[in-house]
Amino acid sequence: VLPGKRLSLADVEREAATVLDPVHADFFAGAAGDESTARANLAAFERIRLRPRVLRDVSARSLATSLLGRPNSMPVLLSPTAFHRLAHPAGEPATARAAEAAGVTMVVSMAATTRLEEVAAHTTRPWLQLYLQPDQDFTRHLVRRAGRAGYGALVVTVDSPVFGRRERDHRNGFHDLPGGLRCENLVDDAGVLRDIVMDAGLTWDAVARLRETTDLPILLKGVLHPDDARLAVEHGVDGLFVSNHGGRQLDGAIATADALPGVAAVVPQGFPLIVDGGVRRGIDVVRALALGATAVGIGRPVLWGLAAAGQDGVREVLELLRTELDEAMALCGARSPGELGPDVLAPHLSAPT
Ligand code: FNR
C-alpha cells in the first residue's frame, strides 16, 4: 500500500475536506435539524449483520446488473446532487465522464450547474431528477428537453413539499451560488433565471399528469412508507428511490436501510428499488441487496471524489466501491448480485415482519 493512498470513501472524504471551502463543505455534509437522520442512515447499515455462506466456488464473479433494461457494470448509481461546480470547476461533465467510464448510471440534478444537454453529451446512461414545478409548462419544457437529449428516465423527488431546514447553511449565510455559477436548467427560453420552487400543493394527481405527458420511465425519489410505494405502483411508476434525501429533508425520518424491507415487501417482484443514504462501503451494497434493493445510490461520496480530484476522484470512489463489493460478495458466498438475498442476513433481520 502506497503511503497516502486513499483506501476507502472515508479517506476521500478527508481529502475533500482539505480542499473545500468550509462553507461549501458544510453545504455538502449538512442535513436538516439535528442531522439525526443523516447519522441514522449510517448506523442502520452498520447494524445489519451478515451470515455468510461458505464453500460455494465464488472464483468467477460478476457485478453486472440491469437498470430499466440498460446494462450497468454494478448495482451502484450516482444519486442526484446539486451544484457540482461548487465541488470542482469541471463540475457535472466530469462526474458524467467518470460515471461513463465506470459503466454506471448518473442521475443529473435539476439543480445542476451545467445544462442538462451538455451533461448528457458525456454519458450514455443519464437520468434526470426533477422537482415538479407549479408552472406545469416549465416542467413539461424540461421533460421535453430531457427526452430530446437522450435521458433514460425521470426521477421525481417527492420528499420536498418544503425545503428542509439546514442549520449549517443558515449559520454560514449560504443561500446563493457564488459568482458565475447558477442552476443552468432553470434558465427559461426568455433567458430568465428562475428559482426552483418546492411545491407544497403536489398530490398523486401530479404523478398521473406526468405519466400522461411522457413515455420516459418515471421513478419517485423519497418514498419511505409502504402505502406510498403501493400508490406509486398503482400510478404506473416504473421504480422507486427509497430515500430520505440523505437526512436533508425530514430530520427524524426513518433510516433508509430500516425503511427498505417494508417497501420491498409491497412492490412486485423485480420492481426497480434503489436505496440511498449512508452507503459508504461495498458491504453496504451487499446489505441493501440482501434487504431487497435492486441497486444503491450514492450522494455525498460523489461530491467528495469530485472535490478531491475531479473526474478521477469520482472514478476512484466508484472503483473503491466496486472492489469492496466484489470482495464482500465473495466473502458472502455469492457470485452475482442476484444471489444476494435474505439468506445472508442474520436471522433476526430475515424474519418476517
Ligand atoms: C442532495 N440530494 C438531492 N436530491 C435530489 O433529489 N435533488 C437534488 O438536487 C439533491 N441535491 C443534493 C445536494 C447535496 C449536497 C446532497 C448531499 C444531497 C440528495 C441525494 O440525491 C441523495 O438522496 C443523498 O445524498 C443520499 O445520501 P448520501 O449518499 O449523501 O448519504
Image (spheres, rainbow, N blue to C red):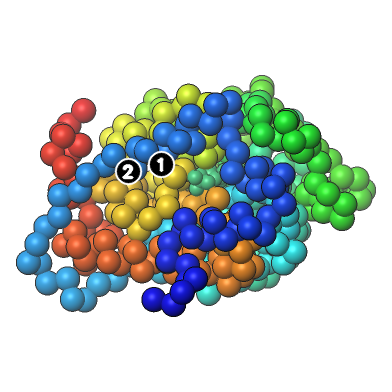
Of residues 179 and 352, which is closer to you in this image? 179
Q: Residues within 10 Å of mark 2 (few under 14, many from 20)?
A: some
Q: Residue at x 41, y 28 (%)?
A: 254
Task: Indicate the quadrant of ligand 1 in the picture.
Answer: top right
Q: Is residue 108 left or right of residue 327?
A: right
Q: Residue at x 15, y 49 (%)?
A: 51
* Disc 1 crowd, CA 10 A, few/some/many (<14, 14-19, 20+): some
Residue 184: x %, y % from top left: 79, 53
Left or right of residue 294, residue 36 in this image: right
Q: Position of residue 197 (x, y in %)?
A: 74, 33
Disc 1 is placed on an element classified as helix
Label 1 with label 2: CB-CB less than 8 Å: yes
User: Which residue position holds label 1?
Assistant: 42
In the depicted structure, whether residue 26 falls above or below residue 170: below
Residue 244 vertical position relative to residue 93 in the rendered view, above or below:
above
Quadrant into which the C terminus falls: top left
Q: Who is closer to the viewer here, 273 or 21?
A: 21
Q: Amino acid at mark 2?
A: Glu
How many numbered circles does the render carry?
Answer: 2
* Beta carbon at label 1 within 8 Å of ligand 1: yes
The residue labelled by disc 2 is: 46
Q: Is residue 79 visible?
A: no
**Most distant residue in the left direction:** 55
Q: Is residue 245 above or below residue 321?
A: above
Q: Who's the residue at 70% across and 62% down the image?
A: 88
